[in-house]
Image: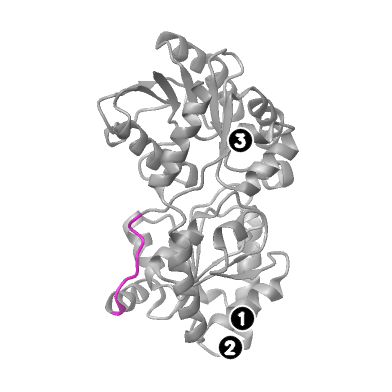
């Protein structure tokens, strides 16, 4: 079989959640299935490390797709030409975008549909594109893969597609995340917080991640306790981040907040391992990879009780309503300094994390590919 793949999000040094999903699944699938040919379609020059095996043919077609008009041109005009040229049997799109101008079977990985429920979090034109085209993509797809049962039900209900057409393919976790020694914790804390313990947030600075609510909760936490606890926020800015910095500017304890921006995977390993706890309270998530990464790093987790997150966190986390700042604050107060609770959550987290692996993700995605080829 010849399987063409949208690999436009394989960007060296700039991988976000969907980029990591693309990398980890395709690396395994292409190596494990040498009997098939894969056409990797990039929208700009690519890093050769992403050509994982000899059965991959890389193709670059422009223009770079970072605007709704360019998405339309790339997927509806450029992609059909590549599919025809290479006589593809299937088009796999790990970010969910499909072509409306081809008859070749297509498999869309739609991680979540937050734009349906929270369109105002996005620039107007992007929200319009997503809400106009993704229902069409869902209907024309031969099959759909998604990363949680919550998202499967949400897509079925919102886009009126057959429930049995959707395969759940849980995200995996990067194997580099693991506990670090006490000596390393001390060094990492010196580097980022002057030696203080810290709560940690990892993710894009985006309205649905509720960073503003986390900042408010942390400020309230600091008014109650008399300690040197910090809040470290790891992630790059996205659209509509103004509210985050407005809240930050008005914080009483803003000097206890550290914004690192993007960091390397190696640095993220250290930052996770040295944290007191992950504080991850988004309004909406299709999965929530940082939760499982924190469990792997051996730190407790405070997270939202909404959307897919309870499916991922199980009984191994402290939950809070992301709309209620006092619940987030109370979770911080409950956890900080409580070694017994921290150790209990860490132990449960080690068990919970084993439900998620990239090997299993790749296996399940391959099963979805096989169904789409039937």
Q: Residue furthest left?
A: 54
Q: 237 and 299: which one is in front?
A: 299
Q: Position of residue 69 (x, y in %)?
A: 60, 24
| Mark carried by residue 166 | 3
- Which secondary structure, mark 2? loop
Q: Marks 1 and 3, Cα distance to the nearest angstrom?
A: 42 Å
In this rendering, the label closer to the viewer, 1 or 3: 3
Q: Which residue is mark 1?
A: 221
Q: Position of residue 306 (x, y in %)?
A: 67, 59
Bounds of the magenta segment? 175-182
| Dot 3 or dot 2, earlier in sequence | 3
| Mark carried by residue 54 | none
Characterize the local packing of mark 2: few (<14), some (14-19) or many (20 or more) Cα atoms within 10 angstroms: few
Task: Check residue 198 for magenta coloring.
Answer: no
Identify which residue is drawn at 55% across, 90% down: 226
The correct choice, above or below, for 178 with respect to 119 in the image is: below
Q: Which residue is mark 2?
A: 225
Q: Marks 3 and 2, Cα distance to the nearest angstrom?
A: 47 Å
Q: Is residue 333 left or right of residue 358?
A: right
Q: Position of residue 366 (x, y in %)?
A: 44, 33
Identify which residue is drawn at 47% across, 85% down: 339
């Amino acid at each position: 079989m010849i399987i063409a793949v949208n690999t436009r999000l394989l960007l060296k040094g700039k991988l976000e959640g969907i980029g990591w999903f693309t990398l980890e699944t395709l690396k395994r699938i292409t190596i494990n299935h040498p009997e098939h040919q894969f056409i990797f379609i990039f929208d700009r020059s690519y890093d050769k490390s992403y050509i994982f095996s000899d059965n991959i043919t890389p193709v670059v077609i422009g223009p770079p797709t970072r605007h709704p008009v360019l998405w339309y041109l790339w997927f509806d005009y450029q992609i059909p030409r590549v599919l025809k040229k290479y006589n593809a049997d299937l088009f796999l799109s790990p970010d969910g975008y499909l072509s409306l101008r081809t008859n070749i079977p297509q498999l869309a990985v739609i991680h979540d549909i937050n734009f349906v429920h929270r369109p105002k979090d996005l620039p107007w034109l992007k929200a319009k594109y997503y809400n106009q085209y993704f229902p069409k993509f869902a209907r024309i797809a031969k099959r759909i893969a998604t990363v949680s049962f919550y998202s499967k039900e949400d897509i079925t209900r919102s886009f009126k597609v057959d429930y049995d057409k959707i395969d759940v393919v849980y995200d995996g976790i990067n194997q580099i995340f693991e506990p670090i020694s006490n000596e390393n914790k001390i060094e990492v804390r010196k580097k980022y917080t002057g030696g203080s313990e810290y709560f940690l947030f990892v993710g894009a600075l985006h309205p649905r991640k509720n960073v503003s609510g986390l900042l408010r909760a942390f400020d309230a936490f600091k008014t109650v306790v008399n300690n040197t606890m910090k809040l470290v926020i790891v992630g790059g800015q996205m659209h509509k981040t103004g509210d985050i910095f407005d809240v930050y500017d008005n914080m009483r304890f803003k000097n206890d907040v550290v914004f690192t921006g993007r960091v390397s995977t190696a640095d993220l390993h250290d930052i996770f391992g040295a944290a007191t706890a992950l504080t991850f309270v988004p309004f909406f998530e299709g999965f929530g990879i940082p939760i499982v990464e924190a469990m792997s790093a051996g730190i407790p987790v405070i997270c939202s009780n909404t959307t897919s997150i309870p499916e991922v966190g199980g009984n191994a986390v402290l939950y809070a309503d992301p709309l209620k700042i006092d619940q987030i604050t109370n979770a911080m107060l409950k956890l900080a300094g409580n070694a017994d609770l921290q150790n209990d959550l860490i132990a449960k987290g080690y068990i919970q994390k084993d439900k998620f692996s990239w090997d299993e993700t790749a296996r399940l995605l391959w099963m979805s590919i096989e169904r789409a080829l039937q």
